[in-house]
Amino acid sequence: MPLAVLDTDVCSFLFKRDSRAEAYRPHLEGKTLCLSFQTVAELYQWAEVRNWGQARRTRLEEWLRNFVVLPYDDSVCRYWARIRAERQRKGHQISAEDAWIAACALRYDCPLISHNASDYADITDLVLITEVEQGGNEIRH
């Protein structure tokens, strides 16, 4: 099955059973769903900041087992550096967190599914799938 990387926002919609998740379901079918190591860290931070109890933390940990977690490696770091430098040259900053997520999608040559498409605008070779800005179109840079 082809891989697809979920941005933290889409992942959280699914976890919380947010109604916005429904728009993304067709993009998830028939794919191996992946998360960047960065998304996992953000979700754990979410639990810390919101002071979740053990039962909810356990539910999150069990739910995360449904995904392939894409790890850091030297290639991911090179993509991250390229993304940050490219965006800086264009005068468009990108957070370190978003750059890690995009770097994982590029490293593993798979689309990134995000509800925050503008965060990933103009990243060379990134295939972005969104249901916000382009009405569900695939955006290729």
Image: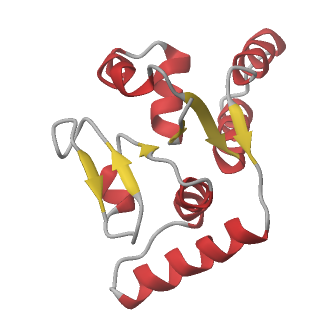
* Residue drawn at point x = 72 percent, y = 47 percent: 37
* Residue drawn at point x = 71 percent, y = 69 percent: 75
* Residue drawn at point x = 36 percent, y = 50 percent: 128
Which quadrant is home to the N terminus? top right
Q: Is residue 67 above or below residue 126?
A: above
**Position of residue 65 in the picture relative to residue 25 (left or right):** right
Q: How far from the left and from the top, in percent, is residue 107?
A: 62, 60
Q: How far from the left and from the top, in percent, is residue 25?
A: 38, 19
**Position of residue 116 in the picture relative to residue 14 (left or right):** left
Residue found farthest to the left: 135
> Disc count in the image?
0
Of residues 121 and 4, the one nearer the viewer is 4
* Residue drawn at point x = 56 percent, y = 19 percent: 15
Q: Is residue 4 above or below residue 72?
A: above
Snapshot quadrant of residue 55: top right
Snapshot quadrant of residue 29: top left
**Position of residue 119 in the picture relative to residue 105 (left or right):** left
Residue found farthest to the front: 1
Q: Is residue 115 above or below residue 71?
A: above
Residue found farthest to the top: 55
Q: How far from the left and from the top, in percent, is residue 62?
A: 77, 15
Q: How far from the left and from the top, in percent, is residue 141?
A: 31, 65
Q: How is the image coloured?
A: secondary structure
